[in-house]
Amino acid sequence: MVVWSDTEIAVFYVVALMIVFKLWTVWHVSLKANANAAGRMIFLGIISGLTLFGIAAKFYISSVMGI
């Protein structure tokens, strides 16, 4: 089991807020640019996919370092 320090927990919350802000910003800019729904979904899919990859890498590295 991985035991996270207080600093890692704080970083996790900050990263979660950054993700929410990033997705909101992308959605807002796409609305202002009058992008169609397909364009918005493609861009949000790329941003979401890269974000999920980064989070999965963090969990994987934490679990490997904890072994």
Image (spheres, rainbow, N blue to C red):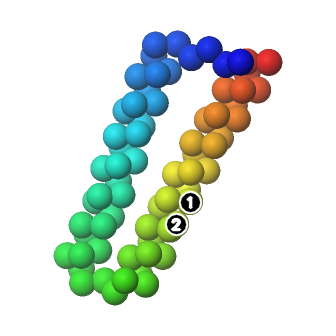
**Amino acid bearing label 2:** Ile
State the SS at label 2: helix
In the rendered image, residue 66, in percent from the top left (x then y), is placed at: 73, 18
Residue beneath the point at 44% across and 75% down: 41
Residue beneath the point at 41% across and 39% down: 16
The quadrant of the image that shows the C terminus is: top right
Judge whether 66 appears above or below 58 on screen: above
Residue beneath the point at 50% across and 68% down: 45
In the rendered image, residue 61, in percent from the top left (x then y), is placed at: 69, 31
Sort mark 2 into few (<14), some (14-19) or many (20+) by Cα contacts within 10 Å: few
The quadrant of the image that shows the N terminus is: top right
State the SS at label 1: helix
Residue beneath the point at 30% across and 67% down: 27
Answer left or right for 50 relative to 33: right
Task: Tell me the number on the disc at residue 49.
Answer: 1
Circle 2 residue: 46
Judge whether 34 appears above or below 30 on screen: below
For residue 3, what is the image quadrant?
top right
Answer left or right for 12 relative to 67: left
Q: Name the one closer to the observer, 67 or 33.
A: 67
**Amino acid bearing label 1:** Gly
Q: Name the one closer to the observer, 28 or 2.
A: 2
Task: List the single residue furthest toward the right.
Answer: 67
Count of labels shown?
2
Task: List the single residue furthest toward the front.
Answer: 1
Sort mark 1 into few (<14), some (14-19) or many (20+) by Cα contacts within 10 Å: few
Residues at circles 1 and 2 in contact by the CB criterion of under 8 Å: yes
Task: Tell me the number on the disc at residue 13.
Answer: none
